[in-house]
Amino acid sequence: MRCAVLLVLLVASASEALAAAPVARHGLSRPSCALGRPAPTAAASFRSSRAGVPEMVSLPAASAAALALRGGLAARTPDQLFNMLFLSLSAACAAVVFVAKQTQGPPDPDAPKATKEVRSLQLRFLLVFWMYKMADWLQGPYFYEVYASKMIGGAVMTTSEVAKFFLTGFSSTAIFGAIIGGMVDSLGRKRGSLAFALLYSLSALSTRANSLPLLYAGRVAGGLGTSLLFSAPEAWLVTEHTRAAFPSALLSQTFTLAYFGDSLVAIAAGQLAGVAAAMRGPVAPFELSVLFLAIGAAIAALTWRENKGGAVETTDASGKKSGGGNIVGEAVKAVMADRRVALVGAVQALFEGAMYIFVLQWPPALKAVLGDNVPFGKVFSCFMVACMIGSSTFGAAIRRVAPEDIMAWLLGLATLAMGAATFSCGGTLAPIIAAFFAFEACVGCYFPLIGTLRSK
């Protein structure tokens, strides 16, 4: 099934590339610059004369921009370039998935089969989950651009000011995340899922404002929504699955379907975001996300029943009982008691810190090379295919290599990728984008890998 889906993506990408309008050789309108430096009005290049001796010729400004854009790649415009890269990455991903499939053993004949009731539960959960994730992914490609395009007090937002919005959302998640889980358990997982749709809609609509208080309030709402997205829907599924006494293996199957579909949703979201932004500007993907939030909330409201969770009591060696819910305190005790927990936590914090720095910095890095007309949606789709390559590679590697060894190689490759991107800034596009794709492949491998290490 995975190969078939990827081949569909491949064909769609090829059709899009072939349908692109022809581009004049000397008619590029997009500016090209390196680290913010404007492109020169003319450029020098070399060509071979009839005698075989290189001679210098002067190129028009548009040709200079084309050379800076191409960076050794065959495409002549950003759209064409990333269409071709999406096609190539999809083909590579299909090959990796095929190889990973071949390394799997035969299916277990004793594995439980999904009944009609299980499939009904899966469908109700997956439809809501994928609608919500589509809304989440739609906001990713243009997060930097939507805030960088704001004019506050007559001044354009700087990168450091955009970073403050970014940090506000994550601070909101960090501050309220520790208590959101308990609130969802007590008030209900269905209510928590509906609250996510409301908060994320308010966050998305706040991007239409040109007022700093409203923009910051939107980021706080988005951070709260993120905490709910990663707690309420999955907790609802687990409780419903357990209440019905379905086999635990089928719960794993549901999560496998959810996150494989999430990868495809992310790829589609990048394409949709690009189309929407081309029509109505960088705020359009955020507006479009509200539609998917409304659809997901409607499905949850009509098909989900409420479930809640109680506090878990624990009994120590002396027989003393203590109520659950002290999440932070229990986490500190676990870190102090087991050195491996501290090490895994340190790896997770450092890698994800680098990942979020990358999320904030890749848009201005590409704008420094391509100018103001970066196709963020298409770039984002390419990143998501690179992530699928990484996660599929992990699926094949984990059968032969210890997860600790995979993590060591992954951290080394991610370091090299970001180092290469850093030293390539100000140069041509090819090494920068290759480094970005390599890092995204590491991200795709990282998430199932860190989950495996945490489970140990």
Image (spheres, rainbow, N blue to C red):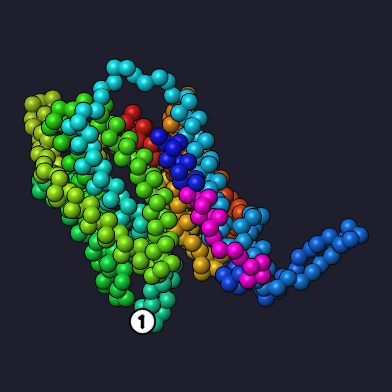
Residue 42 vs 451, above or below: the answer is below
Instruction: Where is residue 221? Give x, y as percent.
Output: 24, 61
Residue 36 vs 3, above or below: the answer is below
Mark 1 Cα within 10 Å, few/some/many (few <14, many 20+)?
Answer: few
Residue 168 vs 439, above or below: the answer is below
Instruction: Where is residue 425? Give x, y as percent.
Output: 58, 59
Q: In the image, is residue 422 part of the stretch drawn in magenta?
A: no
Whether residue 279 appears in this view of the structure is yes
> Residue 248's quadrant in the figure?
top left
Question: At 50% from the left edge and 55% from the top edge, which residue is drawn?
Answer: 16
Q: Which residue is mark 1?
A: 153
Front position in the image: 33 or 354: 33
Secondary element type, mark 1 = loop
Instruction: Where is residue 188? Give x, y as percent.
Output: 11, 46
> Residue 314's quadrant in the figure?
top left
The magenta stretch is 12-27
Image quadrant where one finds the N terminus: top left
